Amino acid sequence: MKIPLLPSPLSALVCAWIATTSVDALVAPQLASRAPTSGQSMTVVRRSRPRLDPDTINAWANEKTAALGVKYGGLNPAEQKRASGMNLLTDQQFDSSYFGSIAIGTPPVSYNVILDTGSADLWIATGSSNQTSTSGNNPIPLFNPTASSSFTGSNTPFQVTYGSGAVAGVIGTDKVQFAGFEVQSQAFGLVNQATPQLLASPVSGLMGMAFQTIASSGATPFWEAIVNSNSALDSPLMAFHLTRMINATSARDLEFGGTFTFGAVNNSLFTGDIDYQNIPSGAPGFWILDLDQINVQGKTVSVGSGSAAFAAIDTGTTGIAGPTEVLTEIYANIPGSQQLSGSQGFWSIPCNTDFSVSLKFGSSSNSWTVSPDDFRLQQIDDNTCVGAFFAMPSSGGQTPSWIIGDTFLKNVYSVFRASPPSVGFAALSSEAISLSDPNLPVPSPTTAPAPNSVNNNNGSDGGGSASDALAGFKVPMGLVTFASLFLGAMIALA
């Protein structure tokens, strides 16, 4: 059986994002946000997805593990109208990464950014950044601070190093809008030096959505500023539904990627209860869960206990990374698998066989299954694929033992709750599954005419939003589902 192949060579950003979510993943930038898109449109070109030869697959695998190690290795009240909001996502390069849109400045200008629950910083390419497009002739949109009357600059240096390169610049402050909310004084990195081709158009940066304690800049993340703003949200949580395009032969580089919901959950996108598990005591500032066990082909694989079982739930990583000894046992239960020669912790698997793999977290009795389509992350030839679980390099520090990325998260509705600190999963509804459709339109960046606005000082300054109209928001299937989601997103921005 043939599956879609990712373009080769993969862009540095895609690789970075893959590292945070799949076995063949490359580390996504720790501090990344998006650059301005200025309402420009981008022509989506259908691209062929060539197979990777052994040398290329090894280089690709090694780059991803190196980048993941870098990402996790050195991480150091007036009552306001309650509301919720949403942001439609885009699936980039066949589930390699998922991005949404933010708006920065006065007047607000929209930019595409990776939404990364595995880091806590926001940065955006700006000014003389030497970024060039890695996907066609479309340049990466850059933020122009002189065009914003609300921008405040500084000389505070900003620098982040990744396995695929580095970014540097200074810290700035400006109004930032996202999902119908606004933080009036959001600090973020203005990147004017970057490794060439670190970003892939139309993405300009990354928004970290983990906790402030791991922010390299020390700035309060956007989501945390909203949560701290005296009950600005209906509920102190955010939720993701991610689509699957890796098995869609007609998929293009950019496809509809799902839905991000802020301050509420979308009941139409999941069934049953949300199974919340608390973040373990003493865990670093990632969205950490205890990984209780992995079941492979009906056999249970032990993952240890305590910090050895800490798993970061990371929307910014493509695959699933873990300790070498556990990965060796996992693949030992998969007939025909073998470690890729010359790679750091990657395994090949037969393409024409479906494997049963599931994960269980915390004290839950629920086991969550990983689709065979997601387990086949990359294709080498007609018969050989690369598995989505890979061994993470040992980097010490606060690095969790496991990184659970989009390979898993595409299979569940995921909820990140600030109080009590926990992560929850629920089964996808038929409506949610129907949205993994290459025929659906790709979202366009939008700005909010009247966002629910707060100061980034744990206070609020009033402001209103019609985004609370999303409470109890229901959607039917297929195109009607998409139309309802799109309308809901526009209501949230009204």
Image (cartoon, rainbow, N blue to C red):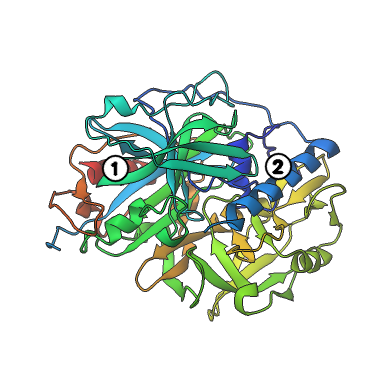
At a point 68% along the width and 46% down the height, the residue shown is 64
Left or right of residue 29, residue 184 in this image: left
- Separation (CA) of disc 1 from disc 2: 38 Å
Residue shown at 82%/40% (left/top)?
Answer: 382
Position of the C terminus, as image quadrant, is top left
Q: Secondary structure at mark 1?
A: strand
In the displayed structure, does residue 102 sit left or right of residue 361?
left
Three-letter residue code for mark 2: Ile
- Say what secondary structure mark 2 lies in: loop
Q: Position of residue 392 (x, y in %)?
A: 70, 58
Whether 154 is drawn above or below 361: the answer is above
Is residue 95 something one can see in this rendering? Answer: no
Along the line of sight, which residue is nearer the eye, 438 or 460? 460
- Residue 51: % across, % down: 77, 34
Camera-nearest residue between 75 and 465: 75
Between disc 1 and disc 2, the foreground one is 1
Residue 165 is left or right of residue 381, and the answer is left
Looking at the rendered structure, the kind of residue marked 1 is Gln
Q: Which mark is residue 3?
A: 2
Q: Quadrant of the N terminus?
A: top right
Among all residues in the image, which is located at the extreme front?
A: 155
Q: Quadrant of residue 308?
A: bottom right
Q: Position of residue 466 (x, y in %)?
A: 17, 48
Question: Circle 1 sits on which residue?
Answer: 177
Query: Residue 314, percent across and down?
Result: 53, 57
